[in-house]
Amino acid sequence: MKTSQTLFNQTKLKATQARLEVTDILLKNPRPLSHQEILKKLPQNFDRVTLYRNLNWLLKNGLIHRISGEDRARYFEINHQFIQSNEKYRSSRKIAPDNHLHAHFNCQNCGKFFCLDDIHPKFKLELPPKFIFDTIELTVKGKCSRCQ
Amino acid sequence: MKTSQTLFNQTKLKATQARLEVTDILLKNPRPLSHQEILKKLPQNFDRVTLYRNLNWLLKNGLIHRISGEDRARYFEINHQFIQSNEKYRSSRKIAPDNHLHAHFNCQNCGKFFCLDDIHPKFKLELPPKFIFDTIELTVKGKCSRCQ
DNA sequence: AATTTAATGCAACATTATTGCAATAAATTC
DNA sequence: GAATTTATTGCAATAATGTTGCATTAAATT
């Protein structure tokens, strides 16, 4: 398992203690976590605003993804594309590419997200005139095994 | 264009003035609207809590869909499946069926949703053990023609 | 070491949505 | 059709999530 320290070392991005701690948590977790869930895993005195700001910074710099839950909270996960892509590739763009489809399951009861790695939908993407494409989100909703 | 009055007449659902007004607005609009947008289209004195409650009621009874925006707001649209399905079909279930895939475009700038009626993805849906399926959401994100 | 720049911590604020409860409207029973 | 029961509405208060302002601290640069 890659650590946040080696990840930051490979980039020109500035590491701080807070960023390393937050990134480590997301690296360790197989599913997107809410701000609240991440805060619980951080040291007791970790400031919640600092967490919000660091999550926004990580998002802006392409290290993580963000998805909006049915429960109005946002959920965050490591951008594996960023981690896998090499330095050369990354340095050619300010923001890491983020346009592949990665499906999730979202529990309508507990709000948790789960990654569905086996879903690879095929379709023709046609947008109205002058609409600009960025990403696609495919979310399956229902009840997770613990909530049924 | 079907009116909310005829829609309610075809069901056993109780119509109130407020429900008819809200439903009429959603019937007239081709794209999902936020609570705020709907409130603006209603008479000035329409209570915002009543709108929240009516939207939740319409959702529970299957007349509308709800999607969560990137902006943490919820957007509402008429459930065309409900409207098209006949009385017999509807009365056999308390909640109208809602498991077809209907794709949307979500503008990352203004937050507006647009329906993408031409997208029909094909994929095999495999969920982890004991997960219960309800609906699928496919959302394309980017900038709409007015925000680029 | 001095200076500039960026990050943090705390308080206040913003937005969206829900809950409690009295008042009103609608449906049901007699 | 009046009396009773049930559901809905309107207003105030509260909840949950997230952002902004600003002084302090830490980090990077000169």
Image: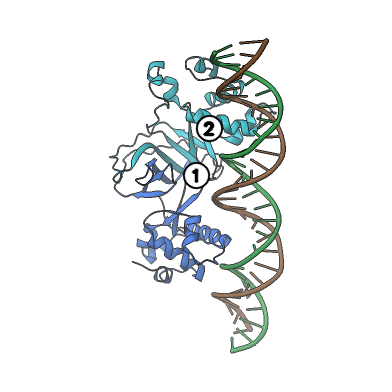
Chain colours: A cyan, B blue, C brown, D green
Q: Left of A132 or right of it: where is C18?
A: right
- Front-most of residues A58 and A22: A58
How many residues crowd mark 1 within 10 Å: few (<14), some (14–19), many (20+)?
Answer: some
- Percent of width and height locating residue B112: 42, 49
Q: Chain of mark 1?
A: B
- Front-most of residues B70 and B88: B70
Tag 1–tag 2 contact (CB < 8 Å): no
Residue at left 33%, top 38%?
B123
Residue A54 visible, this angle: yes
Q: Is residue A15 above or below residue B10?
A: above
Name the residue beneath numbered marker 1. B71
- Percent of width and height locating residue B116: 33, 48
Q: Which mark is residue A93?
A: none
Q: CA distance from mark 1 to mark 2?
A: 14 Å
- Front-most of residues B65 and B109: B109
Residue at left 29%, top 47%?
B118
Residue at left 32%, top 41%?
B121
Q: Is residue A64 above or below residue B146?
A: above
Q: Quadrant of the C terminus of chain A?
A: top right
Q: Amino acid at mark 1?
A: Asp
How many residues crowd mark 2 within 10 Å: few (<14), some (14–19), many (20+)?
Answer: some
- Percent of width and height locating residue C24: 62, 74
Residue A2 visible, this angle: no
- Percent of width and height locating residue C27: 54, 75
The number of discs equals 2
Identify the secondary structure beneath mark 2.
Answer: helix
Name the residue beneath numbered marker 2. A56
Q: Chain of mark 2?
A: A
Q: Amino acid at mark 2?
A: Asn
Same chain shared by disc 1 and disc 2: no
